[in-house]
Image (cartoon, grey):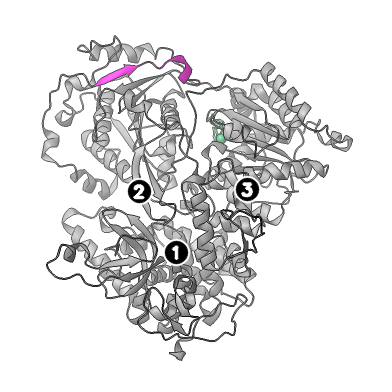
């Protein structure tokens, strides 16, 4: 059917995608917890001797293998016929020299940690070592998990190429697609996929070795996998069928894995792979200025005009800043090669600030150069930087007296109005995770003959990818992340200082192919206050999905789970609370002696159904209720849309011409209002617009032009299409009697269906109900401040409908919202109107009744006590019922 066709259809946007399975897109934010290399607590590199002592120690603690295990330690050598050029390349990798040590450690220990700088060859080589040692014999597979889809795909291709095998043998599996075959020997997959496999086969019996790659990223799923594997490995050992676990990390900060008594009973040995890293000189600014983007601009101009050849890599915080800085630099260094679209001409106009062009002459020294003490730079040593660049720099800083090596870039601050004095063109490229892959690819290709490469990037270039020939790194020291309130779930984007580990990783990017320089746009005093490491993802976001997943795996006491870093107890409690309200969990009978603080709940049948969908629990609930009244196709589409973030792009972001911007905004809003329609359709609000966008795209054709016209993000829409296909299949196999057509074309919902959909939405968002506050008295202070204000069920402060919502300034009294963001006000997004009478049915635990259901006196003071449906007969497997509208 058409569904099959869709699944095999190549979607080029996919492979630039950084999101791991289950997670959703974030258009302007990059991963925040990327690298955690510790430069201060650098361990001594393990030499073979120290390793073998460690290994000996471990052997004493591990029970001697059962005699039947002995033949399982592979002694074979499975031949691989590599191309000569591949073999030549491989031999240059430092990890090749360590093959024997690595394989001995793996053979002799159940768990091994392998550390090495990005590019040392861990991902591409270790699976090959294991293959050659026979770990893929007898129908077993070698499993490698990656936190990113793009890595799973590209690494499987690379390893297949290196081994001269096809993708039938070296395959990948990601959320929506894969190329597994009966011959698959090495399987690259996202960590979310392996987690699903654990749910089906707890012992992972297909595998004799599991590699958790990029463990330093501390993605939420790889953290959970490590917790699960810490129990699976000993279990497999007991059963005489040992499973090996290899944890690979780009950083030395592995104490969370090794020195965590909850995780591994026996401390796993750590093998450090040396990597070729050239010295990088680190230069701090003397002063830390607010306008880091302006500072970055100036620094790039100076490097380009004064310093010898070599690529420049600039770290900024988000997609918008990448665009802004690119545009500004392109204005300064125009080049015929660069067609960056109308967007940039628009953005560059944002900089037509009159103060920009003025000449500023400041003689004061602004930059200090610090040579870091030896302890801190394990992999990029503190040897003097390459002399060529140093001597060049020294000629610049005639008026620095403090240090001989001091540099004063600001003494000739005239970039803003001086045309590039060197003839060399600057080849400026953007880089961020949601950039289409063909544009991402440009940074890997050599720049046009005679030009200098300058990449403006978010922290995606910190560890995830290595851009060739970077000699200068300009680091703003900033990172943008989404913060959640642990209890209320209110999110806010904040730009903060990054961690010391991340800053050092950024610096290291300058020393990949030769000695380099890192210019930090902040002072060394500021740097000493940096956090050492970025926090793991599990401590940074709500954990309701994780809680449900664990309960579904019968891990009842989630607090006792061996997390590498446990999430905050408040966050766990909030998650459990939400799941109780959603009906997914119910309090278990407390043992008399159990402490009150202990969380103890068990999963309900509804919870099991919710857990079977790869979406957030609240959306899983909507799906579980959707098979009534033929609503499922709509619920599936809506949930797919709700699970992907940043579907709508606002007019400002689209690079519309300045004068037309307001017009474009009005036009977009009008188009959305048309989609919302009238009656219940209109009341379903933003979710109806989402549904219409998805529905229309299947008729009109999902093209970039279509998305441009309706203010939709193309990649988000492609993601929704794939998720919709996946959910359709899941729903058809999980829910009894559900038979949704796999044809993505569907008629718009009727008004009655729209009304039922409002109720479905309420059932999943019952904790996100808000009621309009009374109109404040005219002339008072509050009159303006509290106009159109709402009171949310879970927040003290008033909340407001975001101006982009189709229900903005509407008269809806009760609404539900998808999320609240703390911007200038607390803004609700993804709004649907609801009716007060539905609350006792869909949010009973949020209402206070004086008598059960008959006389509702909820805290919302329902406008009418009338309840649409009193029927206690159940409908569907969970006893949840959607009231018939006709009963009104
Ligand atoms: O995993 P790790 O960061 O330690 O290194 P890797 O991904 O195994 O890469 C080892 C080497 O292979 C790198 O130096 C890359 O230059 C090279 N490589 C490549 O040429 N093409 C790829 N698609 C992947 C890696
Ligand atoms: Mg790797």
CA distance separating discs 1 and 2: 22 Å
Query: Could you say whether the residue bearing mark 2 is in a helix, strand or loop?
Result: strand
Query: Could you say whether the residue bearing mark 3 is in a helix, strand or loop?
Result: helix
Q: Which mark is residue 641?
A: 1
Q: Residues within 10 Å of mark 2 (few under 14, many from 20)?
A: some
Q: Which mark is residue 55?
A: none
Q: Quadrant of the N terminus?
A: bottom right
Q: Residues within 10 Å of mark 1 (few under 14, many from 20)?
A: many
Magenta stretch? 366-379
Would residue 770 be seen by someone viewing this image from the given angle?
Answer: yes
Membership of 238 in magenta stretch: no
Q: Which mark is residue 493?
A: 2
Question: In the displayed structure, would residue 582 be above or below residue 322?
Answer: below
Residue, disc 3: 560
Percent position (x, y) of residue 266?
A: 70, 33
Question: In the displayed structure, would residue 13 be above or below residue 873?
Answer: above
Camera-side residue of 738 and 799: 799
Question: In the displayed structure, would residue 390 be above or below residue 445?
Answer: above
Evaluate if marks 2 and 3 touch, with contact meaning CB atoms under 8 Å apart. no
Residue at horizontal 12%, vertical 36%?
A: 355
Q: Quadrant of the C terminus?
A: bottom left
Percent position (x, y) of residue 141?
A: 72, 44
Camera-side residue of 591 and 220: 591
Would residue 124 be seen by someone viewing this image from the given angle?
Answer: no
Evaluate if marks 1 and 3 touch, with contact meaning CB atoms under 8 Å apart. no
Q: Residues within 10 Å of mark 3 (few under 14, many from 20)?
A: few
Nearest to N terminus: mark 1 or mark 3: 3
Nearest to N terminus: mark 2 or mark 3: 2
CA distance separating discs 1 and 3: 35 Å
Query: Residue 447: which quarter of the image?
Result: top left
């Amino acid at each position: 059917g058409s569904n099959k066709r869709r699944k095999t259809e190549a979607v080029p946007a996919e492979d630039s995608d950084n999101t791991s399975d289950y997670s959703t897109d974030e258009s302007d934010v990059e991963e925040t917890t990327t690298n955690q290399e510790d430069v201060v607590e650098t361990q001594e590199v393990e030499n073979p001797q120290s390793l073998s002592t460690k290994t000996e120690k471990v052997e004493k603690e591990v029970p001697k293998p059962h005699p039947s295990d002995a033949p399982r330690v592979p002694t074979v050598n499975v031949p691989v016929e590599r191309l000569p050029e591949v073999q030549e390349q491989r031999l240059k990798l430092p990890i090749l020299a360590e093959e024997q040590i690595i394989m001995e450690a793996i053979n002799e220990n159940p768990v091994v940690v392998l550390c090495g700088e990005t590019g040392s060859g861990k991902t591409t080589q270790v699976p090959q070592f294991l293959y050659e040692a026979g770990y893929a014999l007898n129908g077993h597979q070698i499993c490698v998990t990656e936190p990113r889809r793009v890595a799973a795909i590209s690494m499987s291709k690379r390893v297949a190429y290196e081994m001269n095998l096809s993708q039938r043998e070296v395959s990948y599996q990601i959320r929506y697609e894969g190329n597994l075959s009966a011959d698959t020997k090495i399987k690259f997959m996202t960590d979310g996929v392996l987690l699903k496999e654990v749910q089906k086969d707890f012992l992972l019996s297909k595998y004799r070795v599991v590699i958790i790659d990029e463990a330093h990223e501390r993605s939420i799923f790889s953290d959970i996998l490590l917790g699960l594997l810490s129990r699976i490995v000993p279990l497999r050992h007991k059963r005489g069928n040992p499973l090996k676990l290899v944890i690979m990390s780009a950083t030395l900060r592995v104490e969370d894995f090794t020195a965590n008594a909850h995780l591994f009973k026996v401390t796993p040995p750590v093998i450090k792979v040396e990597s070729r890293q050239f010295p990088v000189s680190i230069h701090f600014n003397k002063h830390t200025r607010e306008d880091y983007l302006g500072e970055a601009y100036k620094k790039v101009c100076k490097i380009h005009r004064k310093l010898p050849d070599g690529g420049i890599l600039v770290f900024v915080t988000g997609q918008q800043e990448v665009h802004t800085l690119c545009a500004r630099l392109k204005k300064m260094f125009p080049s015929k090669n660069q067609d960056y679209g109308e967007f940039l001409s628009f953005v560059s106009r944002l900089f037509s600030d009159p103060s920009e062009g003025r000449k500023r002459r400041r003689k004061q020294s602004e930059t200090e150069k610090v040579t870091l003490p030896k302890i801190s730079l394990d992999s990029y040593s503190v040897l003097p930087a390459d002399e060529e660049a140093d001597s060049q720099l020294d000629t610049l800083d005639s008026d620095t007296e403090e240090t001989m090596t001091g540099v004063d870039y600001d003494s000739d601050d005239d970039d803003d109005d001086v045309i590039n004095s060197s003839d060399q063109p600057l080849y400026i490229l953007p880089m961020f995770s949601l950039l289409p892959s063909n544009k991402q690819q440009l940074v890997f290709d050599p720049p046009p003959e005679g030009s200098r490469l300058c990449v403006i990037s978010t922290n995606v270039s910190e560890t995830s990818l290595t851009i060739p020939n970077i000699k200068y790194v300009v680091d703003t020291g900033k990172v943008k992340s989404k913060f959640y309130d642990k209890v209320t779930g209110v999110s806010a984007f904040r730009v903060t200082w990054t961690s010391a580990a991340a800053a050092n990783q950024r610096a290291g990017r300058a020393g990949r192919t030769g000695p380099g320089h890192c210019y930090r746009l902040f002072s060394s005093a500021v740097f000493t206050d940096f956090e050492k490491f970025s926090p793991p993802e599990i401590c940074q976001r709500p954990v309701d999905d994780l809680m449900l997943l664990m309960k579904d795996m019968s891990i009842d006491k989630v607090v006792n789970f061996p997390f590498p870093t446990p999430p905050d107890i408040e966050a766990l409690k909030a998650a459990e609370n939400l799941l109780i309200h959603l009906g997914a969990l119910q309090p278990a009978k407390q043992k008399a002696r159990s402490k009150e603080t202990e969380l103890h709940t068990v999963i309900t049948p509804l919870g099991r159904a919710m857990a079977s969908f790869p979406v957030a629990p609240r959306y899983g609930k909507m799906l579980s209720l959707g098979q009534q009244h033929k609503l499922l196709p709509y619920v599936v589409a809506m949930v797919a849309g709700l699970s992907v973030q940043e579907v709508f792009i606002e007019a400002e972001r689209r690079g519309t011409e300045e004068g037309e911007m307001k017009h474009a905004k009005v036009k977009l809003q009008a188009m959305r209002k048309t989609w919302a329609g009238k009656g219940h359709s209109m009341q379903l609000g933003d979710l109806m617009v989402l549904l219409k966008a998805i529905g229309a795209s299947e008729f009109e054709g999902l093209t970039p032009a279509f998305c441009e016209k309706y203010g939709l993000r193309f990649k988000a829409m492609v993601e929704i299409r794939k998720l919709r296909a996946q959910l359709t299949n899941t729903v058809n196999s999980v829910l009894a009697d559900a038979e949704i057509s796999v044809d993505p074309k569907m008629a718009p919902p009727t008004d009655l269906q729209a009304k039922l959909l409002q109720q479905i939405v309420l059932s999943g968002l019952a904790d996100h109900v808000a009621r309009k506050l009374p109109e404040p008295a005219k002339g008072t202070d509050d009159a303006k401040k509290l106009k159109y204000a709402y009171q949310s069920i879970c927040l003290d402060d008033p909340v407001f409908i975001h101006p982009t919502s189709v229900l903005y300034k509407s008269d809806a009294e009760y609404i539900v919202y998808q999320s609240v963001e703390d911007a200038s006000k607390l803004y609700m997004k993804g709004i649907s109107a609801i009716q007060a009478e539905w609350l006792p049915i869909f949010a009973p635990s949020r209402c206070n009744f004086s008598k059960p259901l008959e006389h509702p006196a909820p805290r919302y003071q329902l406008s009418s006590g009338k309840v649409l449906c009193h029927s206690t007969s159940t409908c569907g497997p969970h006893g949840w019922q959607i009231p018939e509208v006709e009963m009104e």
